[in-house]
Image: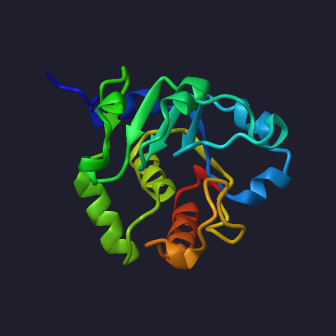
Amino acid sequence: MRLSDSPEALFAELEGRRVALVGNARSLAERAEGAEIDGAELVIRLNAAPLPSPVSHGTRTDWMAVSVPVEDGVIEERRPRRVLWMTPKRKRLPWRIARRPGFALAPAEWNARLAAELGARPTTGAMVIDLLARSGARGVRLHGFDFFASLSLSGGRTAKDVPHDFGAEKAWVERLAERDGRFVL
């Protein structure tokens, strides 16, 4: 029995679509991007997917991409068609998430390649950006990505408390946006 949908199934769903990828930067709460987010053809949110206001964050969630066990109540509130487990840390993957319809597991080799390129463990957001860069999505607009300048709505940790290199991720995303016009910061 195969629990995970294949990367090809994800790519088929992304093909030709305009995607809003919603990060968890606190600074997004100060902006009015909700209508633009909800107007995308596919909305992807990260981890616990905080929604402080429809004005700033919109209300739709088509996919949730997670690297931590998210409570069932949060998943039920967001009602995603898909939940993607992005981290290669398979031991942390709860069965209740893995057995959901539309579940997909990101290939561990994608994470390893990205970690080598960044010189640090990638964030969930970076892993999803990498997945989207591999896809045939027509356009990708990043919302709520300030590379930890305003910290995260997902918790109170600082950059010193996490194993990520936000400067390297910012430079990587900026280079991607320069060479691939589908990506807008």
Q: Residue at x 38, y 74 (%)?
A: 120
Q: Position of residue 33 (x, y in %)?
A: 80, 44
Q: Is residue 117 above or below residue 179?
A: below
Q: Is residue 167 visible?
A: no
Q: Position of residue 113 (x, y in %)?
A: 28, 65
Q: In which quadrant will I find the C terminus?
A: bottom right
Q: How was this image coloured? A: rainbow
Q: Residue furthest left?
A: 1
Q: Is residue 162 above or below residue 42?
A: below
Left or right: residue 163 compared with residue 88: right
Left or right: residue 127 compared with residue 44: left
Q: Residue at x 35, y 73 (%)?
A: 117
Q: Is residue 78 visible?
A: yes
Q: Position of residue 17 (x, y in %)?
A: 55, 32
Q: Position of residue 157 (x, y in %)?
A: 59, 68
Of 102 and 6, which appears nearest the observer? Answer: 102
Q: In which quadrant will I find the N terminus?
A: top left
Q: Residue at x 60, y 73 (%)?
A: 158
Q: How many badges with numbers are in the image?
A: 0
Q: Quadrant of residue 149?
A: bottom right
Of 87 and 127, which appears nearest the observer? Answer: 87
Left or right: residue 62 compared with residue 151: left
